[in-house]
Image: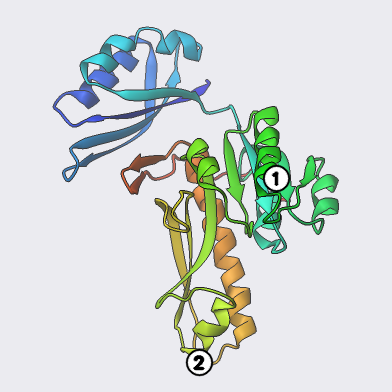
């Protein structure tokens, strides 16, 4: 049976879950997984439901009569075919650990996406990308040509029909205009320390301060640099025995893992924007399974 998903955001009130469950049951559908969150602070309700049509109905048939239910509860909703892979553009500069990790996960089916292009401001990873039969675009960025370069990037996005941009250590700041145009559709990754260090060579700064936790944060990109709604975070412990190069190596690993988890959550429609924060529901059973081992 084909698996579908329904995502819902609406004001919190009584009867939402029952209305959705009854509608799907009347349509001959069986709910296989469900997550919900009632935000008492904002009065917003969030829900994600995975379901199967036991009568073989296609998504249009299932969705056809849902409008009255949605209107009754002021729902912002979407139905999704979980078999349909999201089209993704990856952007990278000269740090390749996240790109290579994503390519591997994509290749074995652990990250079910359709990588429609890789864009870089350098040529370092052209061969790697082309060897995966993925289009590679080198778009140089300078202070003088930044508007032209971004227009070329957006042209690739539009031509490929990409629904998501992933900044896999892309070391260029995007314009406010591009951030607004792709709001909620650009994911970034960066290091995070306790305490925080900014500027050049943050790992060296962390080493010199004796940091014991190295972390990474993946978030949606906004006009406020590195301050968009957070999707995923993680940390790894270090000790006095580690060198500055150890910090960098360990940091690469946690960055790659956090970015992959953030993308996984987004493509499965488990992430809901909630003001400056996100609601991130747990993964459905089987969604991490790989098609092959290598």
> Residue 18 occupies which quadrant of the picture?
top left
Asked whether, in this view, residue 39 is left or right of residue 139, the answer is left
Coloration of the structure image: rainbow
5 vs 139, nearest the viewer? 139
Residue 206 - label: none
Tell me which numbered mark, 1 or 2, is placed earlier along the sequence. 1
Packing grade of label 2 (10 A; few <14, some 14-19, many >=20) is few
Q: Residue 240 carries which label?
A: 2
Q: Which residue lies furthest to the bottom in this view?
A: 241
Tell me the distance, in whole angstroms, between the alpha carbons under discs 1 and 2: 44 Å
Q: Do the residues labelled 1 and 2 touch (CB within 8 Å)?
A: no
Q: Which of marks 1 and 2 is in front?
A: 1
Q: In this view, does 222 lie to the left or right of 75?
A: right
Circle 1 residue: 149
Of 226 and 39, which appears nearest the observer? 226
Give percent across and percent down for residue 23: 30, 14
């Amino acid at each position: 049976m084909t698996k579908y998903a329904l995502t819902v955001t609406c004001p919190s009130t009584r009867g939402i879950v029952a209305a959705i469950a009854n509608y799907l049951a009347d349509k001959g559908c069986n709910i296989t997984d469900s997550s919900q969150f009632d935000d008492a602070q904002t009065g917003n309700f969030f829900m994600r439901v995975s379901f199967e049509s036991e009568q073989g109905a296609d998504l249009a048939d299932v969705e056809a009569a849902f409008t009255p239910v949605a209107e009754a509860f002021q729902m912002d909703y979407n139905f999704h075919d979980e078999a349909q892979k999201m089209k993704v553009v990856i952007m990278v500069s000269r740090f390749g650990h996240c790109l290579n990790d994503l390519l591997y996960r994509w290749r074995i089916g652990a990250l079910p996406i359709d990588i429609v292009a890789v864009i870089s401001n350098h040529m370092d990873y052209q061969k790697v990308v082309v060897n995966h039969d993925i289009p590679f675009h080198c778009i140089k960025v300078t202070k003088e040509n930044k508007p032209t370069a971004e227009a070329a990037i957006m042209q690739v996005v539009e031509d490929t029909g990409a629904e998501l941009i992933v900044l896999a250590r892309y070391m260029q700041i995007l314009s406010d205009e591009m951030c607004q145009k792709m709001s909620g559709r650009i994911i970034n990754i960066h290091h995070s320390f306790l305490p925080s260090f900014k500027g050049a060579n943050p790992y060296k700064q962390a080493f010199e301060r004796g940091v014991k936790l190295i972390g990474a944060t993946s978030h949606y990109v906004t006009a406020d640099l590195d301050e968009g709604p957070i999707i995923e975070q993680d940390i790894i412990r270090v000790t006095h025995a580690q060198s500055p190069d150890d910090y960098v190596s360990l940091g690469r690993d946690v960055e790659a893992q956090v970015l992959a988890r953030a993308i996984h959550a987004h493509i499965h429609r488990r992430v809901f924007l909630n003001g400056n924060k996100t609601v991130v529901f747990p993964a459905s059973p089987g969604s991490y399974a790989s098609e092959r081992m290598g």
